[in-house]
Structures are given as structure tokens and as C-alpha cells.
Amino acid sequence: MSHAIKCRLAFASFIALTACSGGQGPSPSKDPRGRWSGALVTEQGQCPDGDNSLLQIEDKTIVFAPAGKSVLLRGERGKSNDVLTASFTHLDTNHKPYRMVFRGHPVGNAIGGIYATPTCRAHIVMTRTHA
């Protein structure tokens, strides 16, 4: 079994367990506002997967802070709460655009998503924090 398939199976298992577990606060599909955290799981390349990443969801906006990065990806919530998109683009050392993107969605009592850059692709499952 390939590494990519093992990663996807592990991710699917975690999503299933998270979706079945009781969470605190309203379901993110109904009201995702608040703070969320979770660890990135690298699928490809080199990703900042050593510490937790953070997600702040407000009425209309979101901010995603990838672990180990000093940048904030900013974006908007979809109207139906099922699409969360944030991005940040800067120039790399060769003066070429370097885009970081987070795309997430509610999964049971969690927020699941993908973080991607030109050198990294990772999935993440975040749970609501109370800080």
C-alpha cells in the first residue's frame, strides 16, 4: 500500500472518529465561529507539521495561522458555512509569487481542510478550542 493511500486512510479514520465524538459548542456546519486548532499532516513536500495550526472564524472572515509560520492567511466564509478559504501571497527570494492557501469545511464536530504551498501539501483536522 502506498504512503499516499495510507495517509488518506488514516485521515478518513480520524474524520470518522471525530464526526462521531461529542464536541463542545454548536456543530460547525451550523455555527463555525470561534477558535480551532489542529496539527498539519504532510502529504507531500515539507510542511510546518511540528506544532498546532490555528484557525479563527468570525461572522464573515477567517484567519488561518499555519504552525511554525509567522504569516496569517486571511479569507472569507462561504454563505452556507460549508466553504472556508484563506490565502496569502508574497514574493520568494527569486521575486516570484509564493502562494499559501487553506481550504476547509465542517466535518462532524471538526473542521477539516487542506493547506498547500508550492512546496507543501498537508491535510488537517481541527477541533474547537476554548481560549
Image (tube, helix red, strand yellow):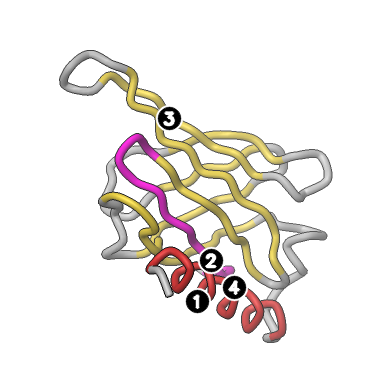
The residue at which mark 1 appears reads as: 10
The residue at which mark 4 appears reads as: 12
Secondary structure at badge 1 equals helix
The three-letter amino acid code for the residue at tag 2 is Val
Secondary structure at badge 3 equals strand
For residue 5: magenta? no
Q: Of tags 1 and 3, which is closer to the observer?
A: 1
Which quadrant of the structure image shows residue 12?
Answer: bottom right
The three-letter amino acid code for the residue at tag 3 is Phe
Is the residue under label 4 in contact with that under label 3 (CB below 8 Å)?
no
The residue at which mark 2 appears reads as: 125
The three-letter amino acid code for the residue at tag 4 is Ala
Place of residue 120 in the rendered image (x, y in percent of width and height, measured from the top left)? 34, 46
At 50% from the left and 76% from the top, the residue drawn is 10
For residue 128: magenta? yes
Q: Of tags 2 and 1, which is closer to the observer?
A: 1
